[in-house]
Image (spheres, coloured by chain):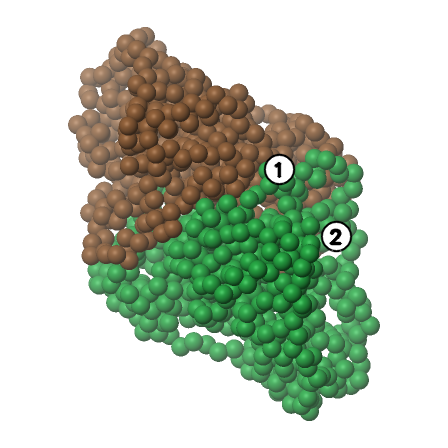
Chain colours: A green, B brown
Amino acid sequence: MNGAEALLRTLVGSDVDVCFANPGTSEMHFVAALDRVPEMRAVLTLFEGVATGAADGYARLAGKPAATLLHLGPGLGNGWANLHNARRAHVPLVNVVGDHATYHQRFDALLQSDLWGLARSTSAWQRSTMRAVDVGPDAADAVAASYGPPGRIATLVVPADVSWTEGAAPAPRRPVPSPSAVPAETVEGVADVLGSGARAVLLIGGAAMHERGLDAAARIAYATGAKLLAETFPPVQSRGGGLPDVEKLAYFGEMAMGQLDGARHLVLAGAKRPVSFFAYPGKPSDLVPEGMTVHELAGPAQDVPGALAALADALGADVRAPLEPARRPDRPSGRLTTESMAAAVGHLLPEDAIVVDESVTSGLSVPGATSAGPRHDWLAVTGGSIGQGLPAATGAAVAAPGRRVLSLEADGSAMYTLQALWTQAREGLDVTTLLLANHSYAILQFELARVGATGSGERAAAMLDLHHPVLDFVGLARGMGVPAERATTADELSSLLEQSFADSGPMLVEAVLA
Amino acid sequence: MNGAEALLRTLVGSDVDVCFANPGTSEMHFVAALDRVPEMRAVLTLFEGVATGAADGYARLAGKPAATLLHLGPGLGNGWANLHNARRAHVPLVNVVGDHATYHQRFDALLQSDLWGLARSTSAWQRSTMRAVDVGPDAADAVAASYGPPGRIATLVVPADVSWTEGAAPAPRRPVPSPSAVPAETVEGVADVLGSGARAVLLIGGAAMHERGLDAAARIAYATGAKLLAETFPPVQSRGGGLPDVEKLAYFGEMAMGQLDGARHLVLAGAKRPVSFFAYPGKPSDLVPEGMTVHELAGPAQDVPGALAALADALGADVRAPLEPARRPDRPSGRLTTESMAAAVGHLLPEDAIVVDESVTSGLSVPGATSAGPRHDWLAVTGGSIGQGLPAATGAAVAAPGRRVLSLEADGSAMYTLQALWTQAREGLDVTTLLLANHSYAILQFELARVGATGSGERAAAMLDLHHPVLDFVGLARGMGVPAERATTADELSSLLEQSFADSGPMLVEAVLA
């Protein structure tokens, strides 16, 4: 057995059975081995940023890593931005990066680069395999390393001759490490704080954003009067279907400080201490008000939902606020605005859907329109690097067949990794892309003012404007094999969403917002 | 004056007056300053790989650096692959990368990353400016550093507060360093070798590929009987209009070894010692045959054309082989094949055109069909990382207004950085994209066999196939505002090229090859 086959068999044996790939010559033996290891599903992408973003979306839903297959330094470079988002999401992810043959590297052939420096700049674990006999064990180590906890990026560099040399063998699966339990003293300490009657905020994130954590957090808040907030961009938030709808920490720092204002204690459960997304002249970076004491109940390497459940028990917090009754917005009609668009989504969102949100400014009304609707999962841009939505939607759909994925996408963001649509068509994935076209980098129009960049005029404004020429997303999607239509009224949007949710396979709906 | 304005004024004062930009919040002060420094032309791109590839194409034609404007680590990551190509092209290029404010970095906000490690993995020079008073001098240093020689990537990281703080001032232009002269002894030594009568190969590249170097090299070959070869992927080759047509070193190693076979000496002038592009089982990496002596006349940091001219003088090589008469292929008709496509290009290529070649396998007949035609420049994928063609064509068109750019593009390669088309439309650039659709990664079908990846079947073949679904490049181009048509016969292709060459502005022609 050659190294490539041992690599594939080790991955599959370690429960990594999906690979998002954009291979080149140095990965051809891996590609050839796919026919001998049919348990591995290889999903072709046209660009590496699609592969890494898809692996992120996949891991958020599947709770286990996908592999990527990337071509040398440039391939890993193209995947870098979405690896950044994946790193912030604390997902497990295994990059397999082909490299020149070991003996070829000293010749500095044209595709040679500082692959190792690049890998180190984005990975928590990296290894270059130097012998075919090592590739099985190294691959098993990579998968184990990716689990953390918390989940992380593991990058395995595989020179071409390691792939093609015989004498390799698959390695057995390594144990999957579990998040560690939070010590009882920590839980008791936080229980004392929250039980003291002093005003407090409980800020949750990460693994707390699923049913068990949300339920415990809501009971704690109800029992103690603590204000419950969630991090701004959680990797996956379970919503609807009777789950508590948790207010998010605001993106803009001054609004976030308002949310924290007046409390004496801040308890963190799976969330980081709040900091401003960007710095602004004269505004604080650290959003924790003076005089507030910060307590960490559980960090991302720990069992966050377990800690919240233990805290609820310690506080005797058995009940939570009465649920709001299930409720959907009425079917909207008339002008297509950010509000009527949100109502259409809320009116029609299918049971058990997955919403991937990269709508930036245009989608701000959608959370409110869906919070009391059917159960769904909501994925955010965890690292703030746009170009993550369409790839993550692709990976989520691979991870969760039978569930409809709604990809809420802004026009500016969509153009970073639009190639994801082709993979959605190729794989027949159940992804509805709702493309919200405002023909601008609207967020930057706010930011230009917020950073105090005064005196700017036409030339600055032109850098934030996408009108010249207008992007035709219907044409772009159809060009990649995805059926697409344009909605200019709320009625048209509702009909098109209804059609897409009823059909199988991908569709793009371009909503031209008034 | 704030740091951003001092940065812009320093760049302009250093003769860097084009910036390919994809800004975010941390670059808003730079954007705002554009209205105060109208000498800087900012060209908006939808993806950072377009910005870096355009800066590469620009520098190859302009002979001076463009700036890029990129957003933190993810922005530089997205630009990495085309920076790799630019590095291999030895062009000067100045990245301006915005960063979080200096005091904000310790808070690890979501967009924080190992920007420094990333910059180091692709740049020959990098600096992070920590005070507004330093930004002028640092920018002037960055431009000077980018000139090398040889040209290189200089990356200046500018935290947001450095941009917005007052008290900065532009710095004066630093001297532009020149390539060093080759010592007379070196020239004499090579003259002795070539004058000895022993069989020799003269391998030229880089700066030798323009008129002066080509002419001297051709005279040397004619006078001494040395075989003249050129590196496989030169940054810019001047062709046509009576210039000698130099045979390229073949991409496949065994063919390259055949070209070198039988010679005793190999003289390098601006080219690297030949190595195989990839390693293959049982085949050598170093392509220099045993017993061949390698002599370097001039490296990329030296005055390569000057060295060739001095060598020609030392050899008394005053004349070169008689020119082939100017000749264009006949206008083709009938089936659209790689040959009739090449004939159409050769028949119609405008005087003084710029050809950007990322056609991979489909364009192999075009060089032969254009070598005796009108004068033109030919740009290759210097680092072997695909996704460079459309951005480089964009930058070349910005650098050379009034000249038609012909972008020969393969369908697989086009999908990495297709967003370049939007910038071409926005700027009204005279770029004709000839999209050669064979619906596959055809090069990899060869490579799969060449690396000895036997036993592969349907699943491997599927990873190299782009038929499902077929990409509609006419729809994709129109979706980004570029007029586009499809050609299915040689006559249609000729008519469409004729139309595009006569019009101003961009156009895409999809050639469906039989």
Q: Quadrant of residue A336?
A: bottom right
Q: Is residue B200 above or below residue A272?
A: above
Q: Nearer the viewer, residue B320 or B297?
A: B320
Position of residue B460 measured from the top left corner of the image (x, y, whole percent): 28, 55
Q: Which residue is mark 2?
A: A280
Position of residue B489 measured from the top left corner of the image (x, y, whole percent): 33, 31
Q: Residue at x 44, y 34 (%)?
A: B485
Chain letter for mark 2: A
Residue type (three-letter) at the residue carrying disc 2: Tyr
Q: Residue at x 57, y 50 (%)?
A: A486
Position of residue B362 measured from the top left corner of the image (x, y, whole percent): 32, 35
Q: Quadrant of the N terminus of chain A?
A: bottom left
Say which of marks 1 and 2 sits in front: 1
Q: Which mark is residue A30?
A: none
Give how far apart the Cα atoms at labels 1 and 2 are.
Answer: 30 Å
- Tell me the crowding category of disc 2: few under 14, some 14 to 19, or many 20 or more residues within 10 angstroms, Cα based: many
Residue type (three-letter) at the residue carrying disc 1: His
Q: Which residue is mark 1?
A: A468
Chain letter for mark 1: A
Q: Is residue B333 left or right of residue A330?
A: left
Q: Residue at x 37, y 74 (%)?
A: A174
Q: Is residue A351 above or below residue A112?
A: below
Q: Is residue B205 left or right of residue B170?
A: left
Q: Is residue A16 left or right of residue A257?
A: left
- Tell me the crowding category of disc 1: few under 14, some 14 to 19, or many 20 or more residues within 10 angstroms, Cα based: some
